[in-house]
Image: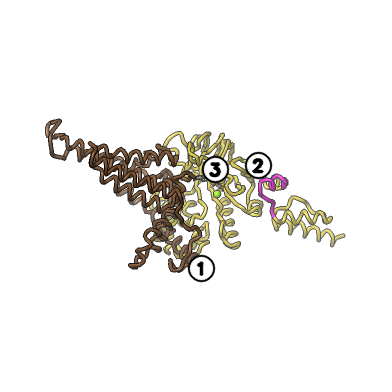
Amino acid sequence: MTPIVKTEGLTHLYSPGTPFERIAVQDLDFQAMKGEFIGIIGHTGSGKSTFIQHLNGLLKPTKGRVLFDGEDIWSSKTKTHGVRFKVGLVFQYPEYQLFEETVYKDIAFGPKNMKLSEEEIDARVREAADLVGIGEELLEKSPFDLSGGQKRRVAIAGVIAMRPDVLILDEPTAGLDPAGSAEILANIKDYHHRMGSTVLFVTHSMEDAARIADRLLVFSGGHLVMDGTPNAIFARPEELEAIDLGIPEITRVVARLREKGLDIPAAIYTVEQAKAALMKLKEGKADA
Amino acid sequence: MLKNITLGQYFPGNTFVHRLDPRTKLLIIVVYIVALFLVDKITAYLPVIVFLAISVMVSKIKLKSLVSGMKPLFVIIVITAIINLFFTSGEPIVKLWVVTITKEGVRAAVFMLLRISLLIMGTFMLTYTTAPMQLTDGLESLLGPLKKIKMPVHELAMMMSIALRFIPTLIEETDKIMNAQKARGADFETGGLVQKAKAMLPLLIPLFISAFRRADELATAMESRCYSGGEGRTKMKQLCYGAIDVTAGAAAIVLLAMVILLNTFGI
Ligand SMILES: Nc1ncnc2c1ncn2[C@@H]1O[C@H](COP(=O)(O)OP(=O)(O)O)[C@@H](O)[C@H]1O
Ligand SMILES: [Mg+2]
């Protein structure tokens, strides 16, 4: 099977040939299969945003190649333009890009640029709004009258409405309260489930990364330093701490409990897992 | 792509020119411009060119950045020179079909070319070697006497420094929004004039909204720190003249004197 997106030796320099030259991403080899759900973690400035902007052709590699479905996206102009619709990219703080008079029109901007028919656009707008939990009654409102969390969801719907094969989100929960952020993550998971698309999302929350991703990429200093399942990655806390990252809080709690002699597994990354393990322990004690 | 703007950019350094008081530099640039416009004999350009060359050398500004800064104005300079070349009446030297090139025309074109380029390069030297904040401080201090006639000098200087402060931010923001809309298939490059103007809407609307939001936030931040205008306000960095300012001022006066001398006795 061909990977849906793939990079080969991807390197990106900002402002090459000037005193401000900076290597943002270096020699990055990566591939994702259809349907994968991937979390990206890394310290600020480690090159995550630069990396994902290559996957839909917004940035051109200084060196190396980016392939979509096995084909180089820079081989022709139509390919580069076409990949924008196949790889949907939601920027950080996407609510700042809203501009239309109504929510409906803003979500329709992407599909319209794809030159789809009116009916098709309408169907997609409604589907996307539904996926992110924006009700019918909000569609005719001005996007500027919505709350922060709603604006964010409208902006995400604007990308989802293009029905991209790969959906990429840059810190989709940044600056939201816990409830709003849980809702967005649930929307994304739901989208992944219903559409079977590949999803990549950047996050600073180890808990979120552990809870919803099947695979994690760890960035440091422009390099992809770790790539594996959350279990495999969080089993290496020393390495994570060396690059200023951590492990989920609950994993620390579990480690302390084990030190105290409690017999629960070490590979616990979410509160739910911890709860289940503790309940099991309690039941085991009650039986005995 | 929007990052390649050099017009009015500051190149940090610690040379003689960089260390001059911004007021000295502003006054010198005034003297320089006066001298430049007084020139009416070709040899009188010599001291002006020498003065500029020395300040370029001392400040270690690359000639390349000076020339590349002129690029956007290149067309205007050339057109002005051409107009002067063809449309000045006087003693003809070349006659081609309907156009006549006169001796006076050649002279006017050369003068115009030198005057405009020297003017631009001189002012660039000012902005290249003076931090924007210093420049506004200097302006505020020099225009200070106008406060007596109720000119809001401090407020104008503050507005100018805020504008300068936010130019890079806005450029960055434009880049970001442009990319975000491109990711939704927006096309800023192709199409006719009307189409292109329409395509700018998804960029301009969010940009304006964010500019207003920033202005609002800044106003709140300033108010919550009790900003209340220039009345009784002191500065963290006091401007003060030093020996180097006297040297530079003397050089500017020598420049002016040389120009006047060559105007009278030169060819
Ligand atoms: N537009 C840009 N111009 C110049 N340098 C940039 C730009 N964007 C990012 N960088 C630099 O590239 C590096 C990687 O940045 P980025 O990809 O934004 O990291 P992250 O998203 O992981 O925080 C940083 O050192 C940053 O300063
Ligand atoms: Mg980032």
The amino acid at mark 1 is Ser
* Mark 3 → mark 2, Cα distance in angstroms: 15 Å
* Numbered disc 1: secondary structure: helix
The residue that appears at 43% across and 66% down in the rendered structure is: B230
The answer to whether residue A55 is magenta is no
The amino acid at mark 3 is Phe
Residue on which the image places disc 3: A51
**Whether the residue under disc 3 has CB within 8 Å of ligand 1:** yes
Instruction: Check residue B109 in the rendering and tell me which mark sits there, or answer none.
Output: none
Instruction: Check residue A226 in the rendering and tell me which mark sits there, or answer none.
Output: 2
Please determine if labels 1 and 3 lie on a single subunit. no
Chain ID for yellow: A
Residue on which the image places disc 1: B224
> In the rendered image, which quarter is residue B106 located in?
top left
In front of the other: A142 or B115: B115
Task: Judge the density around disc 3: few (<14), some (14-19), many (≥20) Cα neighbours within 10 Å.
Answer: many
The residue that appears at 38% across and 40% down in the rendered structure is: B66
Residue B122 vs residue A153: left or right? left
Query: What span is in magenta?
Result: A235-248
User: Tell me, what colour scheme is on the image?
Assistant: by chain
The chain that hosts pointer 1 is B
Say if B3 sits above or below A152 in the image: above
* Numbered disc 2: secondary structure: strand
* Mark 1 → mark 3, Cα distance in angstroms: 40 Å
The amino acid at mark 2 is Met
* Mark 1 → mark 2, Cα distance in angstroms: 46 Å
Task: Judge the density around disc 1: few (<14), some (14-19), many (≥20) Cα neighbours within 10 Å.
Answer: few
Say if B95 sits above or below A202 in the image: above
